[in-house]
Amino acid sequence: MRAIWKGSITFGLVNVPISVYSATESHDLRMHQVHGKDGGRIRYQRRCEVCGEVVEWGEIDKAYDDGDRTVVLTDDELGELPTERSREIEILQFVPSDQVDPIMMSKTYYLAPASTSAKSYALLRRTLEETDRTAIVSFTLRQRTQLGALRVRDDVMLLQTLLWEDEVREPDFTGLDSGVRISAKELEMASALVENFSGDFEPADYTDEYQEQLRTLVEAKLEQGDTVDTEETFGEQEKGEEAEVLDLMEALRRSVSAAKEKKSGGSSAKGSGSSASSSGSRSPRKASGGAKASSSTEKKPAASAAKKSGTTTRKKPASKKSA
């Protein structure tokens, strides 16, 4: 891993030198745009509307327009702002961890101790763990003053950037508890359904079905080219039946019954030694929750699996990936 920023955590007179690393990354298959007619790569240019020339990144500055006047700000001027020059993550307050609303959380980073700060890092980490507190911090990263939450996960301190209060929108729409009456029986049935779908959250039990199917399609196109048949690749698509209109209680009753059957079926399969994991791929939902389990040999049908693909596969010399 490569550090994206180096600085220090400060609270009172205590200083903890750290390095910052990105904690997450996208697993999406990277693709680029091409001209459908001939497969030519689509390129975008930064062209000046005054002189008409293509402008390199190094020649681009930022500007603010108030409607009457335009102010141009260079990178050097922005870099001289006091907050931009700061390399400190300042702890503002320690708050109960359950007071940080998840809706405010944005990007997550790992904080690693510098070689000279092992003890102060360990002290702050253990203090956060034993007090069950989250540190609210302020710092500047990439020309933005950020609010953040500092907490511990698996012996590593995490820095999670937080949205500012005015960046979280209020729910301004109709239909929230407007004259709705929930009976005790409906609530009881819904609770029973929740119970049948309950379990411990294991992230590895869930997969991105779209990305898996996309990779399968790409591999099939690489092998078969224009002759690829999506029905053969993904299996024949099941024709959807018209949904039966049910009242809420009947829908809950049937859902609870189906969940119980699937849950008991999953338990029987485990007892006989045939679990969902033995199929070679994980289910997108927990098998104990009554959802379908996918298999590497039986792919789920794609949304548009009725026709052959008309896309063209072309062999091209190796080139750099687009950003």
Image: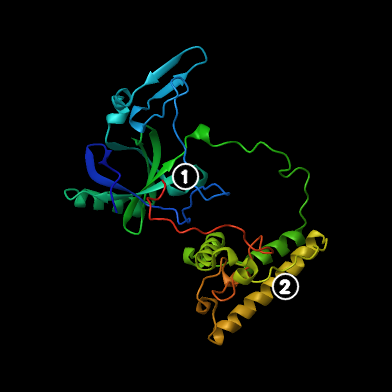
Q: Residue 105 shows which numbered tag?
A: 1
Which color mode does the image show?
rainbow
Label number found at residue 257: 2
Q: Secondary structure at mark 2?
A: helix
Q: Position of residue 38 (x, y in %)?
A: 54, 50
Residue under the point 60% across and 36% down: 170
Q: In front here: 116 or 62?
A: 62
Residue 92: x %, y % from top left = 35, 36
119 relative to 161, above or below:
below
Q: Residue furthest left?
A: 116
Would you identify the image quadrant in which residue 297 lies?
Answer: bottom right
Q: Whole-Å distance between the Cαs marked 2 and 1?
A: 37 Å
Q: Earlier in the sequence, mark 2 or mark 1?
A: 1
**Residue 196's quadrant in the figure?**
bottom right
Amino acid on which the number 2 mark rests in the picture: Ser
Residue occupying image coordinates x 52% and y 15%? 67
